[in-house]
């Protein structure tokens, strides 16, 4: 599909005979924000886990930036340019904001263990470049005031922003956000929505996000894919999905 950065082709996934995903196909165009919606158990997080190599699909194929990913692993997919956040914060709670963000660059390092241990060779220049990049992302997400704060002591909304910073620091082409606004109040959702739009528009990242707040989805996304028990029941623009009778009945809680 022309312009698609991500293609999900007939992907199926089962756990002990229970179908999590069933012949699922859709494409995400470069530069868009694509939302995945559906009830709990619809297969949304399982799909993200297939895309970034946590799970291996039973059948089907993931194509990223025109290249099939035949044997995906989390580190291999990350090196291709895919970033990820999780439902529950996967932060190092006793470390500072800056140090948490720097961990997002670990996989890009080329210095050897000896160079790192003795701070020689490639390590000093690499360390400076990584720190500069981390500081840039911290400033972009407006968390400079907390750069030295211990993450575990920060409010929940700020912790979610730190996790976003860690996912962004390696400049991913595709960013997978698993319920980034779960547990947030209305003001926090509005603020994080603004940052997600900025990431998309100013940093040029294509975004696939899971979100249960349909109001947020309709206002933020260019493209919406609706899942129901691992099957696709809607796929289109927010307006198209809003008018889809199956989506209306199953997810928006209203009559057609």
Image (tube, rainbow, N blue to C red):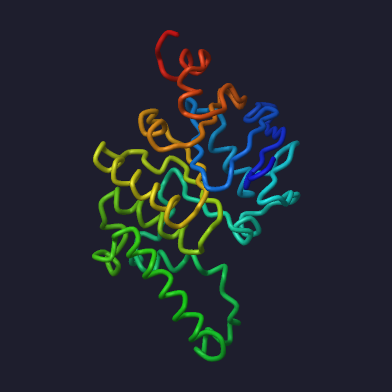
Compared with 242, 197 (above or below) is below
Residue drawn at x 24%, y 40% is: 187
Compared with 36, 198 (above or below) is below
Residue drawn at x 47%, y 45% is: 177
Could you say where residue 89 lies in the image, as x and y percent from the top left?
A: 40, 50
Residue 189's image quarter?
Answer: top left
Residue drawn at x 59%, y 40% is: 28
Name the outermost residue toward the front: 2
Q: Depth check: 173 or 116 in front?
A: 173
Compared with 8, 161 (above or below) is below
Q: Quadrant of the C terminus?
A: top left
Could you say where residue 255 lies in the image, as x and y percent from the top left?
A: 42, 8
Q: Quadrant of the N terminus?
A: top right
Residue drawn at x 41%, y 30% is: 218
Could you say where residue 126 lies in the image, as x and y percent from the top left?
A: 51, 80
Residue 9's image quarter?
Answer: top right
């Amino acid at each position: 599909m022309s312009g698609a950065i991500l293609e999900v082709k007939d992907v199926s996934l089962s756990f002990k005979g229970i179908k999590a995903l069933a012949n699922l196909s859709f494409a995400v165009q470069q530069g868009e924000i694509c939302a995945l919606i559906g009830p709990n158990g619809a297969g949304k997080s399982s799909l993200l886990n297939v895309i970034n190599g946590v799970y291996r699909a039973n059948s089907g194929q993931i194509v990223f930036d025109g290249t099939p990913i035949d044997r995906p692993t989390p580190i291999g997919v990350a090196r291709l340019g895919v970033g990820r956040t999780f439902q529950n914060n996967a932060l190092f709670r006793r470390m500072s904001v800056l140090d948490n963000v720097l961990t997002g660059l670990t996989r890009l390092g080329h210095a050897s263990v000896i160079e790192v241990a003795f701070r020689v060779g490639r390590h000093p220049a690499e360390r400076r470049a990584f720190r500069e990049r981390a500081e840039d992302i911290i400033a972009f997400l407006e968390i400079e005031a907390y750069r030295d704060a211990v993450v575990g002591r920060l409010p929940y909304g700020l912790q979610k922003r730190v996790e976003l910073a860690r996912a962004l620091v390696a400049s991913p082409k595709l960013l997978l956000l698993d319920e980034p606004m779960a547990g947030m109040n209305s003001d926090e959702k509005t603020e994080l929505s603004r940052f997600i739009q900025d990431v998309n528009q100013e940093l040029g990242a294509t975004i696939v996000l899971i979100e249960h707040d349909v109001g947020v989805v309709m206002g933020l996304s260019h493209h919406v894919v609706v899942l129901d028990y691992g099957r696709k029941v809607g796929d289109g623009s927010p307006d198209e999905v809003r008018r889809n009778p199956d989506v209306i009945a199953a997810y928006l809680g209203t009559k057609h």
